[in-house]
Image (tube, grey):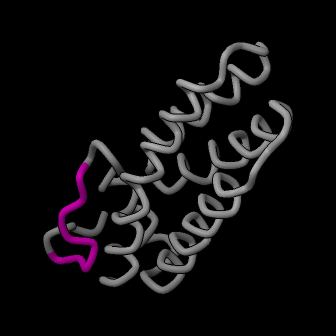
Amino acid sequence: MMSLAADPLGEVDPAICDPETLADLADLFGNERLAHLLASLDEEIVRRLGQATTTSTDLGAHAHALVSVSGTLGFMSLSRACMALEQACLDRASLEGDFQAVQAEAARARPVIASLRGRL
């Protein structure tokens, strides 16, 4: 595995994104491809959370799409928040708290994504 100290990924807050996952992905795909994957995640966050959704089904579908892409790239807190929102949509439970949690995690993740992309 690539050492993060010798890597343009530098220090990553593990509460937001798993640095080992990032290092593994950089080893597997290379920095250019990882930057592209991070850009895609950021675009998905903006597209899926920026849309005015009228139904819990739509919101659940957006959350579901973000669960895997954010988790695959190591943004586990965002992935878990999306998973909770998706489950709340399926359960037809109150969504406000879960939606706010997803928005908060997305707000923490986006600057990290931008910083990582700038260093790759």
**Frontmost residue, 47 versus 70:** 47
For the point 32% across and 54% down, which residue is it?
20
Residue 62 place in picture, x, y as percent? 74, 46
Answer left or right for 72 relative to 53: left
Looking at the magenta stretch, what is its main secondary structure?
A: loop
Which part of the image, by quadrant, shows the N terminus? bottom left
**Frontmost residue, 8 versus 112:** 112
Q: Is residue 80 above or below residue 18?
A: above
- Within the image, what quadrant is residue 114 found in? bottom left
Residue 105 place in picture, x, y as percent? 43, 44
Q: Is residue 66 above or below residue 36?
A: above
Q: Is residue 65 above or below residue 114?
A: above
Residue 80 place in picture, x, y as percent? 51, 33
- Within the image, what quadrant is residue 22 found in? bottom left
Q: In this view, does 35 lie above or below 49?
A: below
For the point 43% across and 62% down, which residue is it?
110
**Frontmost residue, 54 versus 63:** 54
Which portion, as a residue range, is magenta? 6-13
Answer left or right for 111 relative to 6: right
Number of dots carrying numbers = 0
Which part of the image, by quadrant, shows the C terminus? bottom left
For the point 76% across and 13% down, which residue is it?
91
Residue 97 place in picture, x, y as percent? 53, 24
